[in-house]
Structures are given as C-alpha cells and as structure tokens.
Amino acid sequence: MAKEQLTCVSCGRRISPTLRAVAFYCPNCGTTRIIRCYTCRQYGREYVCPSCSFVGP
Ligand SMILES: [Zn+2]
Ligand SMILES: [Zn+2]
C-alpha cells in the first residue's frame, strides 16, 4: 500500500502526520484533493487547485 504524499498546496511543505491538516475536494472541479496544513489554515492562506486553477480562501 503506497503512502499518499501529503503536501500543502499553499506553502508546498510536506505535511507531518502528527500535525492536523485539512483535506477536501476542490469546490470547483470536485476531482482534485486540496490539502492544507494546519498553519496555512490558521492564517487563511490562499490555495490554488492544480487542475482547474481555482483560487479559494
Ligand atoms: Zn501550508
Ligand atoms: Zn479544481
């Protein structure tokens, strides 16, 4: 079973399993998973969907 690589879409850092991160599907295209680390969520940094270039808060 391959481990899914978790990389924050906002800061590009790999997410440690010990840190709380949020993962959700892009609200625009619904096919790409957006993963944000706890820090970026706290600061409300923007994210960009790599598939459809949707920018969200
Ligand atoms: Zn981040
Ligand atoms: Zn998208």
Image (cartoon, helix red, strand yellow):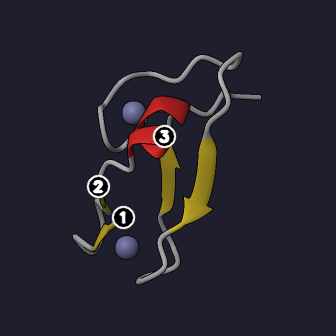
- Residues under labels 1 and 2: Cα distance? 5 Å
Does residue 6 show up? no
- Residues under labels 1 and 3: Cα distance? 11 Å
Q: Could you tell me the amino acid type at mark 2? A: Glu
Tell me the SS state at disc 2. Answer: loop
Residue drawn at x 71%, y 16% is 18
- Please give the residue where the numbered disc 2 appears in the rendered image: 46
- Residues under labels 3 and 2: Cα distance? 11 Å
Q: Quadrant of the N terminus?
A: top right
Front in this rendered view, residue 44 or 34: 44
Q: Could you tell me the amino acid type at mark 3? A: Gln
Q: In which quarter of the image is the C terminus?
A: bottom left
Q: Where's residue 53, x and y in %?
A: 22, 70
Q: How many labels does the image show?
A: 3
Front in this rendered view, residue 33 or 43: 43
Badges 1 and 3: C-beta atoms under 8 Å apart? no
Q: Where's residue 16, x and y in %?
A: 59, 17
Q: Which numbered circle lies on residue 57?
A: 1
The reply to whether the residue tagged 3 has its Cβ within 8 angstroms of ligand 1 is no
Front in this rendered view, residue 5 or 14: 14
Label 2: how many Cα within 10 Å (few below 14, some 14–19, many 20+): some
Q: Quadrant of the rendered structure where residue 54 is?
A: bottom left
Q: Which quarter holds ligand 2?
A: bottom left
Does residue 18 show up? yes
Q: Is residue 49 above or below residue 18?
A: below
Q: Which numbered circle lies on residue 42?
A: 3
Residue drawn at x 48%, y 40% is 42
Residue placed furthest toward the front: 43
